[in-house]
Image (cartoon, grey):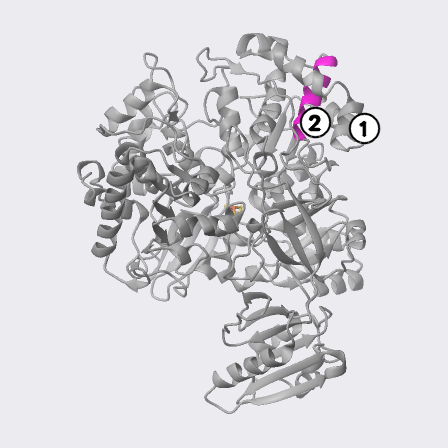
Amino acid sequence: MLNDLSIIQTTCPYCGVGCGISAVVNEESHSVNIQGDPLHPANVGKLCSKGAALGDTLSLDGRLLEPHINGQVVDWDAALLLVANTFKETIKTYGADSVAIYGSGQLLTEDYYVANKFMKGFVGSANMDTNSRLCMASSVAGHKRAFGSDTVPGCYEDFEHTDLIILIGSNTAWCHPVIFQRIRAAKQLRPNLKIVVIDPRRTATCDLADLHLPLASGSDAILFNGLLSYLNKEQALNQDYIDRNTEGFTLAIQTAEMSAPGIAEVAAQCQLNETDVQYFYDLFKDHKNVMSLYSQGINQSSSGTDKVNTIINCHLATGRIGQSGMGPFSLTGQPNAMGGREVGGLANQLAAHMDFSKVDDINRVARFWGSDNIATKPGLPAVELFNAMATGKIKALWIMGTNPVVSMPNADFIKHALEQCDFVVVSDCIAQTDTSAFAHVLLPALGWSEKDGTVTNSERRISRQRALFKPAGNAKADWWIISQVAKRMGFNQAFNYSHPYEIFTEHATLSSFENDITHGYRDFDISGLATLDQNSYENLQPIQWPVNTNNPKGTERMFADGHYFTPTRKAQFIAITPRPPVNLPYNDYPLILNTGRLRDQWHTMTRTALSAKLNQHSPVPYVEINPVDAKNYNLTAGALAELESGWGKMLARVKITDDQTLGNVFVPMHWTAQYASNSRMGALVNPEVDPISKQPESKHTPIRIKLYQAVWQGFILSKAQLDLCDVSYRVNSKGDFFYRYEVASQELPDPWFNTLKDTLNANSAEKPEWQIYQDASLGCYRAAQFIKGQLNAVIFIAADHKLPERSWLSSLFAKVTLEPAERRALLSGQPPKGSHESGKVVCACFNVGEKTLRACIKEKQFKTHQEVGQCLKAGTNCGTCISEIKALL
Ligand code: SF4
């Protein structure tokens, strides 16, 4: 405690890196100063722009603070009773498989454990799936096929000991920024560290790459089969390791050689340059310490599991696994996707890395939980779950901490499915989401800064997430909400928890229950944490599982002894015949849509969009397209485009870039109906799934694109929040002292515009003063509203998208009064002579814009990002923008 401040060690709630945070909390002002925790092994003090801005997201505006039934505030007892009774009645009438839970990688391990125990152990159905299905189910399936267990072999420290890092289907620079910083630092220290990026598009991650392979979408398995067959031809395999520790090599190599006999064939099928393929294969052959880091570009595919196994095959065949600086490494997307896997949060998992394939496992878990009604078969994975809902098979659904109306593929169909469901419960910390609109019951859950429990990151490291503040309003922990419903359904004894440490220690005890030579070993064993008392749980330090008698301080690397968790204790080669994506482009839909994350937003923006700082980097939904494709489809930079697939449509601003290969476009995943109309990319996405992992094909949707013919386009900056619903295109975001609205319409502007002016006038008790410029012949309309001499709003309308930049106009809202020159220049949208416009924000940490950077680089003739950093500080904190600064240089 520092006076009235306290310092609390906790964990970032965004990506799977799992960075430790040192939070200086001021309870009185409900504010927090966020710093990276220098003692946390995942990030040793570093944070990215999202983690560093967590303090901006803690406002209670928009929070769900009370339980609701059909839109009316009720007390907890009424809400819990309705949920319990409806679930009970539905099960009684239609059977246990008529109800389901759809959870989230945002849940803490303790929440996840209780939800899973409730559904699988006591409701008696395994219909509990999560949004982790959309993220890493293929990695889980690939691990299990190869290792007999869902085990990530290595750790982050390996990045500092390896000689070759291959980043496959991963924009690490934006999606796992602190890992990227670690890799950047390792390369600075050891310039001989080679980095290969395998991705159809050129991303910020390529900034560090010695080689970028922009392979054809979906062709990864061919590339890695080719690598295996090349290593075999070059006699670069570790035959001793293959013989001692693996099975299935002969069939795997025969199959690989059939699909990828030589470099020429691989290059042709992957649409790569032969020299580049040869260079990549030689890099792999010549470096003993190789790490293959892969992420959603591999997982989100109708052959994702196969792709994972082609990568693992190459590591097994060379024995490059289980030792320092080597191994395949799945980067998990969400903060607790790994914790969810540990408790069995996917519909095909049971608990503690046991599943439904062995009767012994089912009986074991039933005995441990004291349940006589345990589920005995897998439940429905996400896409099948919502399909079953649409046909009336799922009658009651409980959604926890996720937004499937935005994030699921074929997202308009998800709306339809929810409409068919008799009873929808949503637990969330945010009141209005695209999904909560379908809820019969809304249950207020704790937000990040109020939660107390554990999460597990990509390197198997369990960390504490600690509460910084008391619960907002009447919000409750997810584990508490589920337990209360369970008790009201009659499962009193099994859900009698009063503190998360009781849940954690039960979970730890289950991990070691009959986990021995007699019953067979399981990889997930945290028996060393099973006897924690409340105090030691409160003070638990980050630790990597397994944690047991043999490894009381945790385990950095797995499989060092060459033993795996298969029945023979040997790793399995999987023979892979590569399959193309399920829906290939054809005449009606000739382009391939790829999707992914942005640098400064997280998932469906429910939290990151609350930060003005984070909204500046990419304020509107966009589509990246190759210059040749743009020309073919009459698209110019900044224009609005309509994208359409066989499943849905969206609008996005055109960004023309050579980073996209011909025939491919990219759209960020984040925008929801709360922040944009007609811009949910999930509406377009291909709902085909991998036959093994059931993960959808989110990286490959055939689409078509055309210019969106708006009659007018414009933007509004306003001090007050506005309700702009009757325009065909709207994107809203929050600035520091204003709200920003980007708008366009296919209707004539006059009636809409007059209504807007009336609304702005009605918002003010004082008589507003207007400054107006109009040229009807050009479709140009510009206006500024002042109240008591202060700028209150600006409206800029044009016949097309060619409008002034918003940065200078936005900066004027921070001023009490405008200078006369600024006021004169206002409706030109340009700063007066001698003033400066910073341009689009590049460095979110220090708010440095593109125009400022360009001017500084030009004037001072800078050549390196370090020089720029010394002058403007840009890129010197989280470093996420360094690749953009380098591009400007
Ligand atoms: Fe959070 Fe960024 Fe660390 Fe991911 S890399 S855990 S988003 S601070």
**What label does residue 274 carry, if any?**
1
* Residue 783 picture quarter: bottom right
Give the magenta range.
Answer: 220-234
Whether residue 179 is situated above or below residue 607 in the rendered picture = above
* Residue 436 picture quarter: bottom left
The residue indicated by pointer 2 is 223
Whether residue 1 is situated above or below residue 256 in the rendered picture = below
In the rendering, at what x and y percent does residue 558 appear? 48, 23
Q: Quadrant of the N terminus?
A: bottom left
Disc 2 and disc 1 in contact, CB within 8 angstroms: no
Mark 1 surroundings: few (<14), some (14-19) or many (≥20) residues within 10 A: some
In the rendering, at what x and y percent does residue 388 appear? 42, 40
Q: Is residue 599 in sight in this rendering?
A: yes
Q: What's the residue at 65%, 56% (across, down)?
A: 622
Q: Amino acid at mark 2?
A: Leu
Q: Is residue 357 left or right of residue 18?
A: left
